Amino acid sequence: MGRRLRALAAALSALPLALAAAPSAHAADPTTLTNGFYVDPDSSAQRWVAANPGDGRAPAIAASVARTPMARWFGSWSGSIGSATGAYAGAADARDKLPVLVAYNIYNRDYCGGHSAGGAASPSAYATWIAQFAGGIAGRPAVVVLEPDSLGDYGCMTQAQITERQGMLTGALTQFSRQAPNTWVYLDAGNPGWAGAATMAQRLHDAGLRQAHGFSLNVSNYFTTAENTAYGNAVNSELKARYGYTKPFVVDTSRNGNGSNGQWCNPSGRRIGTPTRLGGGAEMLLWIKTPGESDGNCGAGAGSSAGQFLPEVAYKMIYGY
């Protein structure tokens, strides 16, 4: 970020919360305040390459995965969350790059799926955590994907639990509006194979989508960019018809190069997709899930845990077999 823009961002982050929440303060476009996307120097792929320089797979994984801009996920493992998000956004800002962060700590996370179960200890604990997450970013430019799967994972939940989750997401969006004026927040909307467009539009709206910049699709999944674009447009059509507004959307293309074979948990034969960039049928195409990171103890990742980097899976994903 240029010196003048840095000064503006610092000034915005120092404003009282009520003033920072004003529409004019939240209108900044973080893509224009930066020069390209940030490459996480400590991603699981980067760490594996650094630790295994003699492995024959390392050059391909370094070139095709580790050096591609992708999101960093934050949860209970991140320690002091405000310090963690502040350090990450600050490191990107020092390089004039735009970081992508994923907030993944909602209470009763992956309640129905189970492979990534966990999250905050209570709704109030989550409210504190997400407020500190947003406060750590402050006035720095950033993109945040908010709680992947949270609106798709309704299958086994009671209405009281759904209402509780909606309240947590609405509260989270309020915190970003108040504390992170140069952050675009995308509320996660699952993928084309999870819920119909009308259903997802209602879930997004009920969770406070009006406060978000947009919604995210295909996180950790495999549907093609064209399928996601059609789904995103259909969701927007429902939003427009029912509630009178539409929102931009982003697509996770990290593993959708061969599309979906109907399986979501470490399916074989998948391929990396279009690297992170602006446009492409959506507002942005992003690598949100790191290729090679396991979805859980299943499929090609049998014996692994969710988030564990599997070099053979990453290597095969580069070539699509």
Image (cartoon, grey):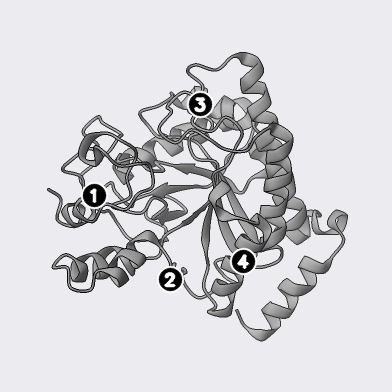
On the image, numbered disc 1 is attached to which residue? 257
In the rendered structure, which amino acid carries the disc numbered 2? Pro
In the rendered structure, which amino acid carries the disc numbered 4? Pro
Coordinates of residue 26 in the picture (x, y in percent)? 72, 57
Q: Determine the residue positioned at 57% across, 66% down.
A: 88
In the image, which is nearer the foreground, mark 4 or mark 3? 3
Q: Determine the residue positioned at 38% across, 47% down.
A: 307
Q: Are marks 3 and 2 in contact (CB under 8 Å)?
A: no
The image's mark for residue 125 is: none
Q: Are marks 4 and 3 in contact (CB under 8 Å)?
A: no
Coordinates of residue 280 in the picture (x, y in percent)? 37, 55
Q: Is residue 88 above or below residue 234?
A: below
CA neighbours of label 4 inside 10 A, class few (<14), some (14 to 19), many (20+):
many
Q: Are marks 4 and 1 in contact (CB under 8 Å)?
A: no
Q: Is residue 258 above or below residue 170?
A: below
Q: Determine the residue positioned at 29% across, 42% down.
A: 224
C-alpha distance separating marks 4 and 1: 29 Å
C-alpha distance separating marks 4 and 3: 32 Å
Sequence-earlier tag: 4 or 3: 3
Q: Determine the residue positioned at 17% across, 68% down.
A: 55
Sequence-earlier tag: 1 or 3: 3
On the image, numbered disc 4 is attached to which residue? 141
The image's mark for residue 111 is: 3
